[in-house]
Image (spheres, rainbow, N blue to C red):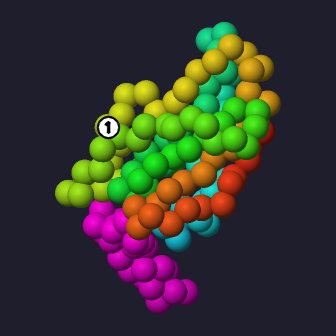
């Protein structure tokens, strides 16, 4: 039991220390696995908020974020913070969200253009 615990701690420590040095190539499969977390909704202060916080954490692996509200036209571009290769998973953007009047967004469709130029499929999420 103790050996198993120490093994888990060793593995977790390795993953944790590697995350600070994560390359754009390593970010792509993680983004694909976490597509349900790309955006999140919140109603607050009389507005509907859509957060892109998860994507901001992987900005070095993303060239562009295209999105659209209530359609799959992908006619908007969300501007990510600049990539900091020395600290690739830091988040410095003060406003990682968009806001609109309550109930405006019945859905959001998102597509990523990865740093290597490849594209994700379209992810659609409802509040």
Image quarter for residue 35?
bottom right
Residue 49 position by quadrant? top right
Task: Give the answer, above or below, for where 68 lies relative to 115.
Answer: above
Q: Is residue 84 left or right of residue 127?
A: left
Instruction: Identify the residue under disc 1.
Output: 92
Relative image position of residue 62 (x, y in whole percent): 43, 55
Q: Which residues are magenta?
A: 1-27
Seen from this angle, which residue lies furthest top?
Answer: 46
- Image quarter where the N terminus lies is bottom right
Residue located at (35% from left, 76% from top):
14
Based on the picture, tell me whether residue 30 belongs to the magenta stretch.
no
Queried whether the magenta region covers residue 18, the answer comes back as yes
Q: Do we see residue 28 in this rendering?
A: yes
Relative side of 66 to 3, left or right:
right
Q: Residue at x 33, y 68 (%)?
A: 23
Residue 71 horizontal/vertical position (percent): 76, 37
In front of the other: 5 or 125: 125
């Amino acid at each position: 039991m103790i050996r198993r615990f120490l093994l888990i701690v060793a593995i977790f420590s390795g993953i944790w220390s590697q995350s600070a040095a994560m390359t754009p190539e390593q970010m792509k499969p993680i983004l694909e696995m976490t597509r349900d977390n790309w955006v999140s909704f919140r109603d607050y202060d009389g507005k509907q908020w859509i957060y892109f916080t998860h994507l901001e954490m992987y900005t070095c692996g993303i060239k562009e974020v295209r999105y659209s509200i209530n359609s799959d036209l992908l006619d908007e571009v969300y501007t990510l913070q600049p990539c900091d290769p020395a600290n690739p998973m830091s988040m410095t953007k003060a406003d990682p969200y968009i806001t609109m009047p309550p109930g405006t967004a019945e859905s959001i469709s998102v597509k990523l253009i990865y740093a290597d130029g490849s594209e994700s499929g379209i992810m659609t999420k409802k509040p």
